[in-house]
Amino acid sequence: MTDTPRDIATEILDAALMHVPFDGWSDTAFNAAIKDVEVAPAVAKGLFPRGAIDLAAAYHRRGDDAMAAALESKDLSDMRFRDKVALAVRLRIESVEDKEAVRRGATLFALPMHAAEGAKLIWGTADRIWTVLGDTSRDINWYTKRATLSGVYSSTVLYWLGDDSLDNQATWAFLDRRIDDVMQVEKVKSQMRKVPGVGKLVTGAESFLSRIKSPKRRRDDLPGGWTVPR
């Protein structure tokens, strides 16, 4: 009988979550987690070089993984696309088991030195949602879809953090309004294309922007890159 290999990165993250509500995503929580799982500090630093900031990032990506799995298990065939997006954002928020861990993360990534990391994580969530939903855009729309959804997601999370309504009903209503706002913008763009004179300008701008291509996906089986273990 062989022992199951330890997933030390997961163990450290799980242990840290016991301390984050009290100490935040800090070195104190990171060091306490290392002590809890009885692993050498050098090993922990090898897995999370930046310590708590990498732990917080790993926790965020864990939520993305849970959302993607939940979304892929749903039958979305009869749903409108805007409802699929709303469902994805809702599933992402519902994947959170401890609201305080998210609150502490929002505080951490609001700091100027970590703001870029926070924006990168939110963009990653938006990208994950569009990818699971089968987005095939490779032009400027690749960017605008993710930028727009990043705004919807981040504003909804902030609303949710302060929501004390039954079953978060106020949050889901807020989410629906934000998505309706986005759909309204698309409707206005469509109407502008039909306006004499203005329509040509819009079409010309869209033609120019269509030359912008989405970034190529990095192959994970090639050397030269590194990501924090999930």
Image (spheres, rainbow, N blue to C red):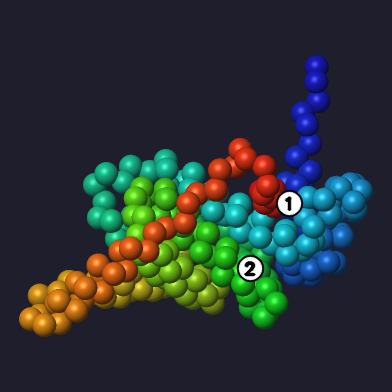
In this view, the residue in front, 116 or 97, is 116
Callout 1 amino acid: Asp
Alpha-carbon span between mark 2 and mark 1: 21 Å
Give the residue number, with chain letter if any, for mark 2.
Answer: 117
| Image-quadrant location for residue 84 | bottom left
* Label 1 neighbour load within 10 Å: few <14, some 14-19, many 20+: some
In the structure shown, which secondary structural element does the residue marked by tag 2 occupy? helix
Name the spot of residue 28 as percent of width and height, x first: 85, 67
Residue 180 appears anywhere in the view = no
Left or right side of 88 for 77: left
Left or right side of 230 for 47: right
Q: Residue at x 75, y 70 (%)?
A: 24
| Image-quadrant location for residue 88 | bottom left
Name the spot of residue 183 as percent of width and height, x first: 26, 70
Callout 2 amino acid: Glu
Left or right side of 35 for 73: left
Name the spot of residue 185 as percent of width and height, x first: 26, 75
In the structure shown, which secondary structural element does the residue marked by tag 1 occupy? helix
* Label 2 neighbour load within 10 Å: few <14, some 14-19, many 20+: some
In this view, the residue in front, 140 or 20, is 140
Select label 2 or label 1 by which is in front.
2
Q: Residue at x 73, y 46 (%)?
A: 10
| Image-quadrant location for residue 162 | bottom right
Q: Earlier in the sequence, mark 2 or mark 1?
A: 1
Give the residue number, with chain letter if any, for mark 1.
Answer: 14
